[in-house]
Amino acid sequence: MNRAEFSSPTLMAMFSTSARIRCSVVAALASFARRRSSARMSWPATDCLATNQPMAPPTTRPATRSPYSMMAVMEEQPRRRYMMNTPTSMFKSNRLLRKIMRFEQLNEGVWAMTYLIVDETTNEAALVDPVYDFLQHYLDVLNRENLTLVYAIATHTHADHITACFSLREQLDCEYVMSTETASLGVSMHVDDEEKIMLGSIPIQFHAAPGHTNDSMIVHVPGYMMTGDFLFNGAGGVGRDDLPSGRVNVHWDALEVLNRFEGSTVVCSGHDPPGTEMMSLDWNRSHNPVLSMTSFEEFKSWQDETAAKLGGVSKIKTAIPANLFGELPDRIPWLD
């Protein structure tokens, strides 16, 4: 076949038709393969648990170095964070989730709160704000109830106690979870604002809530919001902002994050007097003095008065270095 014959309109039309047929067949096969593997390979569209607003699926990016950490962080998250991630619309209701979820506060007779979340169908567990002083108690609970600790979560870098998160990771190989904004070393899983991970069938979602510290976040599961020191129940108001990385103006602005949550959500704070009943967000809007304030000046005045009344933090010189470096000091004065 010479060039003239090859260039004829008839042959070119035949070639184009053949190419189109081949492309159609390939596209059909690819579409069929995608449908066959969608249950395993696709990224489902997910909702914000607090607002039911659509969220974009995670994107894969090269490994980067967090500006707040000495460790390289893979932006493509570990498999179990998303492969078990089911769209919120597939859950029949929060009531169904609560049937399989156990939620309790573990520390008795102290001001620092630690929350246990359990999927009772898989015996997978998460601890939120575990305190090193009670590490053996947590290990006993996990062992006695045959629970597998998947996540140890810190709502922020604590100044008043040493977190048990890095010790739990060392002993049980769980994930140590904190905000991407943290300066703490030893964290194995960094989470962004509105990011969601799964504990068995239980969705856990994170909401950036800076102010008390730069890395403060709210941890949300159906029906409960663990607020750390960002928000307390009732007269306690909020955490003080005069400690390292605290910013009064940032805290004031960040209070807007509370609008993401339903009013019936129970506020589970990081500190409250022993025996305090955890109340709903709506209740706190009426009884928490900070949530009724209308100006930044009023909030700043309240913060200044609170800091003066509370005075210094006795454990800060031991707790903050331990929490930042993820290492226990040679001596913990209050445990002597």
Image (spheres, rainbow, N blue to C red):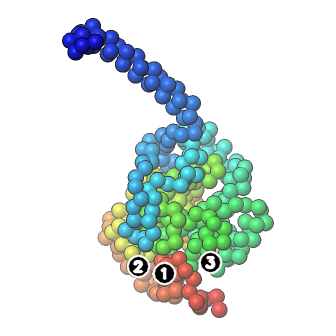
Give amino acid for label 2. Answer: Pro
Q: Nearer the viewer, residue 5 or 162?
A: 5
Q: Earlier in the sequence, mark 1 or mark 3?
A: 3
Residue under label 2, please give it.
244
Q: Nearer the viewer, residue 303 or 31?
A: 31
Q: Position of residue 138 (x, y in %)?
A: 69, 71
Task: Please tell me how many numbered marks the rendered image carries.
Answer: 3
Residue at 40% across / 66% down in the picture? 66
**Residue 135 visible, this angle:** yes
Measure how far apart labels 3 and 2 are at the Cα level. 21 Å
Residue under label 1, please give it.
320
Which quadrant of the structure image shows residue 16? top left
Mark 2 and mark 1 in contact? Answer it, CB < 8 Å.
Answer: yes
Q: Nearer the viewer, residue 290 or 111?
A: 111
Mark 3 and mark 2 in contact? Answer it, CB < 8 Å.
Answer: no
Q: Position of residue 165 (x, y in %)?
A: 58, 71
| Left or right: 242, with 283 as reference point | left
Measure how far apart labels 2 and 1 are at the Cα level. 9 Å
**Mark 2 nearby-residue class (10 Å; few <14, some 14–19, many ≥20):** some
**Residue 272 visible, this angle:** no
Q: Nearer the viewer, mark 3 or mark 2?
A: 3
Residue at 53% across / 65% down in the picture? 188
**Mark 3 nearby-residue class (10 Å; few <14, some 14–19, many ≥20):** some
Establish if 128 lies above or below 137: above
| Secondary element type, mark 2 | loop
